[in-house]
Image (spheres, grey):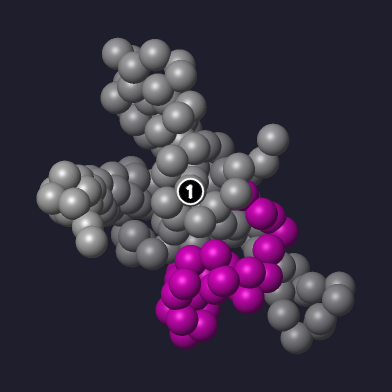
Amino acid sequence: MESEARRDAVGSIEDAIGRFIRSVRTSVTESAQAFAPDLQPSAYAIMGVIYAKAPVAPATIIAATGMDKSSVSRQLRALKEAGYVTAQPDPDDRRADLYAPTAEAGARFEAIRASNRARFGATFDEWDEEEVVTFAALLDKFTGRRRES
C-alpha cells in the first residue's frame, strides 16, 4: 500500500513536470522565432537533430523527434528552401538524402543554444555541484536514459 507521503510526492512531481513542459514549450517557441521567424517550431526541433548528428537521414530525424514522416519531409523542404540545410544523396541509399546545416545556420543555431544553456544554467546558480549532478542523474533515471561515463 502506498503511503500518503509518497502519494503527495508523486502528485507534486506531476505538477512540477507540467510546469516544466510548459516552460520548455515556451523556450522552444522563442528559440524557433529567434532562429527563423518564418519557420514552425517543429523545424527548429528538426534543426537540432541535424545540428547534432549531421549528416543525417530523415529516418534518424523521425526517430529522434517522434514526428511523422510527412511532417519531417515538409519541414526539411522548408529548411532547405530557406537555405538553412543542405542535402546530399546518401551513399548507402541513393533514394534518401543526408542533411547538414549550412555554416550560417549552424552558427545561428549554436548561438541560440548557447544563450539558452546560459539562461537555463543560471537556474542552478544557487545549487551546489552535488545537487546539480544528482538532479541530472535522477532526471536521466526518470526518463530511462543511461548516462555515459
Q: Relative to residue 142, is residue 96 depicted above or below?
A: below
Q: Name the residue under label 1.
A: 141
Element class at badge 1: helix
Residue sticking out furthest to the front:
1
Could you tell me if residue 108 is visible in this image? Answer: no
Taking the spot 47% from the left edge, 72% from the top edge, the residue there is 66
**Magenta stretch: residue 58 in it?**
yes
Taking the spot 39% from the left edge, 47% from the top edge, the residue there is 35
> Residue 18 lies in what quarter of the image?
bottom left
Whole-percent x, y for residue 55 in the image: 72, 59
Using residue 2 as the reference point, say whether residue 59 is left or right of it.
right
* Residue nearest the observer in this picture, 97 or 128: 128
Whole-percent x, y for residue 47 in the image: 51, 56
Quadrant where the C terminus is found in the figure:
top right
* Residue nearest the observer in this picture, 33 or 70: 70
Taking the spot 81% from the left edge, 82% from the top edge, the residue there is 94
Q: Relative to residue 37, is residue 116 depicted above or below?
A: above
Whole-percent x, y for residue 145 in the image: 54, 52
- Which amino acid does the dot numbered 1 rest on? Lys
Tally of numbered discs: 1
Could you tell me if residue 149 is visible in this image? Answer: yes
Q: Relative to residue 65, is residue 117 depicted above or below?
A: above
For the residue carrying disc 1, how many other residues have a C-alpha within 10 Å: few (<14), some (14-19), or many (20+)?
Answer: few
**Magenta stretch: residue 71 in it?**
yes
Q: Which span of residues is magenta-colored?
A: 51-80
Using residue 54 as the reference point, say whether residue 121 is left or right of it.
left
> Principal SS element in the magenta part?
helix
Quadrant where the N terminus is found in the figure:
bottom left
Q: Relative to residue 34, is residue 74 depicted above or below?
A: below
Whole-percent x, y for residue 50 in the image: 59, 57
Using residue 129 as the reference point, say whether residue 22 is left or right of it.
left
